[in-house]
Amino acid sequence: MSTALRVAIAGLGTVGAGTVSVLTEHRELIARRGGRPVDIVAVSAKNRAKERGVSLDAYDWYDDPVAMAREADVDLVLELIGGEAGPAKAVCDAAISAGRHVVTANKALLAIHGDALASAAETAGVSLNYEAAIAGGIPIVKALREGLTGNRVTRVYGILNGTCNYILTEMRENRLSFETVLAEAQNLGYAEAEPGVDVDGIDAAHKLALLASLAFGTRVDFAGVYTEGIRRIALEDIDYAEEFGFRIKLLGSARMTEHGLEQRVFPCMVSKDKPIAHVEDAYNAVVAHGDFVDDTMYEGRGAGAGPTASAVVADIVDVARGFAVATFGVPVGALADTAAVPIERHRGAYYIRLMVRDEPGVIANITAVFRDEAISIGSMLQRARSETEAVPVVLNTHVCEEAAMRRTLERIEALDSVVQQPTMIRIEPLN
Ligand SMILES: NC(=O)c1ccc[n+]([C@@H]2O[C@H](COP(=O)([O-])OP(=O)(O)OC[C@H]3O[C@@H](n4cnc5c(N)ncnc54)[C@H](OP(=O)(O)O)[C@@H]3O)[C@@H](O)[C@H]2O)c1
């Protein structure tokens, strides 16, 4: 068998320790598939004394992961620290400058610095692989970069954040509020103490920016992703969605249009007829539509030591095999610069929930605003009647432009009888 692929691992947390486990437990299998053994040579993390559930005795320890990336005698550096800057970026820069291949799971880093890192890797003639960065264990990078390469991909969308999907599933199944489920998820370690990156949609937006680049051959444009999270989703909305035949999902969705690239992350209502509506708990799923293949869907675990390490090891084996593909499918110089389509130009149907004082004329005033903006209402529901408390008025619109919907909601919120900010959830036909 040929010489071993020598690997250094920066970061030994969930993903790093998981990767050590796979590489040691499946050493023979990986050597057979990669055509040569994969040897871990050096490792680095913050705290050397920490118990990690894997033995590190056989490896050189570095306190400084950047020095390791620069100096250790290795072919490949795994960046499994995380974060869009700081040591993660410095590790990748140092490894590439030293002519070493890089495998990372870091979507935040790639969403911001992906083009620059890919360009540096290209110049240095090394691979920059990141299967674990998007939807964890699901091999979606390989699907887009290799399996669908004969297609023009016209649309890609998915459930890209397991924490949000878990929260929405728990809210619906156990009839709990967002705040209660979030607190539970934090206690169980499923959600971070600072949950904003997940629940505000930022993590999904990082992944979507990478998916869009892979799907459409465009430069990574994280700033062009319109992003909304799930904090404003109330249990009532989940109940109404069920009643109307929908599920609420946080979807990341990218589409190439004649006006430019649409990249959106927002909670939306999807028909229960669609398979993605039934992807529950912490699972992720991605649907890619190719002009020849039609819809393809990939589902699996988006996080956790095993699934993420599975993806990292697939990238390592590619390097062992000497198999290389441009980071975003085509050389960086060939990636297109495409204008981002602003959310105001989004066209779709909307679910609106208003809390109103139950008094004469309120419905007439509301419908007048919709009429003024030429938005037609598909259905309207006014449930309980009460002289003392606000009551919900729920309506679904036909397709209209978001700019008109925003003007409508601003005017409706200003009406005396409307007592709180309207809730608006987009309805996604997914076609
Ligand atoms: N967790 C998942 O399920 C998952 C899924 C997909 C992608 N990812 C991505 O994978 C990456 C790693 O995530 P993770 O969950 O494994 O994170 P983690 O458990 O927090 O582990 C991070 C590791 O980096 C080490 N580290 C932090 N700062 C360091 C520094 N200055 N120098 C050296 N080592 C340093 C930590 O050392 P100590 O252990 O000594 O503190 C720890 O071992 C992130 O980019 C994340 O977005 C994670």
Image (cartoon, rainbow, N blue to C red):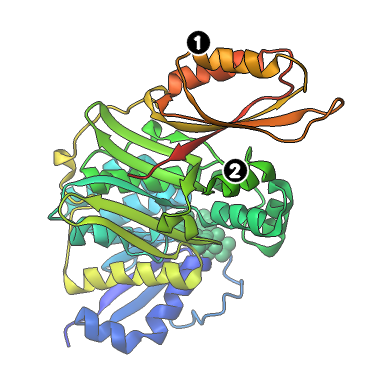
**Picture quadrant of residue 347:** top left
Q: Is mark 2 within 8 Å of ligand 1?
A: no
36 vs 358, nearest the viewer: 358
Residue at position x 29%, y 33% in the image: 261
Q: Quadrant of the N terminus?
A: bottom left
- Which residue is more in the foreground, 17 or 431? 431
Q: Indicate the position of residue 83 as horizontal and vertical percent values.
A: 48, 49
Residue in front for this viewpoint, 374 or 406: 374
Secondary structure under the numbered disc 2 in the rendered image: helix
Q: Which mark is residue 196?
A: 2
The residue located at (56%, 13%) in the rendering is 369
24 on left or right of 193: left
| Relative to 321, 174 lies left or right | right
User: For the residue marked with disc 1, what is the amino acid?
Assistant: Asp
Q: Secondary structure at mark 1?
A: helix
Q: Position of residue 152 (x, y in %)?
A: 16, 47
- Could you classify mark 1 by the number of other residues whose Cα lies within 10 Å: few (under 14), some (14-19), or many (20 or more)? few
68 sits left or right of 13 in the view: left
Looking at the image, residue 198 lies above or below residue 418: below
Give the amino acid type for the residue marked by disc 2 in the picture: Gly
Where is mark 1, residue-wise? Answer: 372
Residue shown at 59%/43% (left/top)? 196
Quarter of the view holding residue 209: top left
Residue 73 visible within the image:
no
Is residue 169 shown above or below 50?
above
Q: Nearer the viewer, mark 2 or mark 1?
A: 1
Marks 2/1: CA distance? 37 Å
Q: How many neighbours does mark 2 have within 10 angstroms: few (below 14), some (14-19), or many (20 or more)? A: some
